[in-house]
Amino acid sequence: MEKSCIISINDVWHTFGEKMVLQDVNLTVNEGDFVAITGPNGGGKTTILRLILHLLKPTKGSVLYFEGDKMLPYRILRAAKNRYGSTNELGMFDMTGQGLEEIENPSQMLLEGRPLGVSGNCVACTMEGSRPILSEIQALATKTNFPAPRRACSGYDYNRMNLLIAVLEKRAGYFFGNLDVYINIVGGIALRDTACDLAVCLCMVSSLLDCPVSDKLIAIGEVGLGGEVRSVPNLEQRLREAERIGFERAVVPKHSLAHLNPADYPGMKLIGAAYISDAIHALKSDRL
């Protein structure tokens, strides 16, 4: 049985200042492979590991990572490259009998089969390189049976989830101390973009209140420790992608409305939220 590639390092160079550490390195790691890196002190072993772990970016060349759930029929190709400036890009491919075929509309594919009218669901938009991708976020808050409530994430940062729970408790008055909380990013994609904070918060409160978020709404914004909803880069691109997919309302940072022209989004209503409590109030008032 042919193994699938999960890491591919192509023509990688890396320098620290004027010192060349790696030069023209090529490496392919297939699923199930055991890899050992040996060499003298100062030979670049640690540098290679840091490149693989996203802790460094190559001075030249590319590092490719295949991601995705083994049970799903598609794979995510993440590229970290630095040839004429640093670039992080993502591509999605369908695994067919003829090999990998590009998925031209990943947002639509990731939202297929989304449950409608169910609490704890919201859609966010993440930027993968220059490409906006919509992704469904699911949250479940339920009474715990353990002395210490469980917290679990799939596709989302565990520490970021705990931070957002603390903000919701302190700044919005929603108590999760006796609840298990689970976050799931549908489709096997990993969200690293803080612009998804607002959607994650709405998901958790929606599950807590058992109050569904509208199926035609998207939430975009970073949430700070003061409960404020902060601006995010590439907001116009994210909104255009959401409108193209068919979303009719978007919750965005309130102060970002001054830089947006509603006429550019004729099929979408923009809702400004200065604080996380503003977005939650709209949810409870059934305005979302």
Image: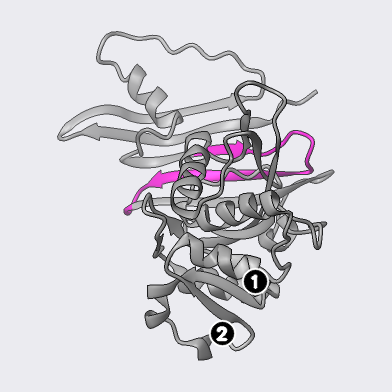
Position of residue 82 relative to residue 181, above or below, is below
For residue 24, what is the image quadrant? top left
Position of residue 239 relative to residue 13, above or below, is below
Towards the viewer: 43 or 123: 123
Name the residue: 40% across, 41% down: 61
Which comes before the other along the chain, label 2 or label 1?
2
Horizontally, is 68 left or right of 281 in the view?
Answer: right
Q: Is residue 86 magenta?
A: no
Q: x, y percentage for residue 286? A: 68, 71
Q: How is the image coloured?
A: one colour
Label 2 element class: loop
Residue at image mark 2: 265
Q: Which residues are magenta?
A: 64-85
Quarter of the image that includes the C terminus: bottom right
Name the residue: 31% across, 27% down: 22
Label 1 element class: loop
- At label 1, the amino acid type is Ser
- At label 2, the amino acid type is Tyr
Checking the image for residue 285, the label placed there is: 1
Quarter of the image that includes the N terminus: top right
Q: Residue furthest left?
A: 18
For residue 199, what is the image quadrant? bottom right
Name the residue: 43% across, 67% down: 234
How far apart marks 2 and 1 lie (CA) works out to 24 Å
Q: Which of label 2 and label 1 is nearer to you?
A: 1
Q: Residues within 10 Å of mark 2 (few under 14, many from 20)?
A: some
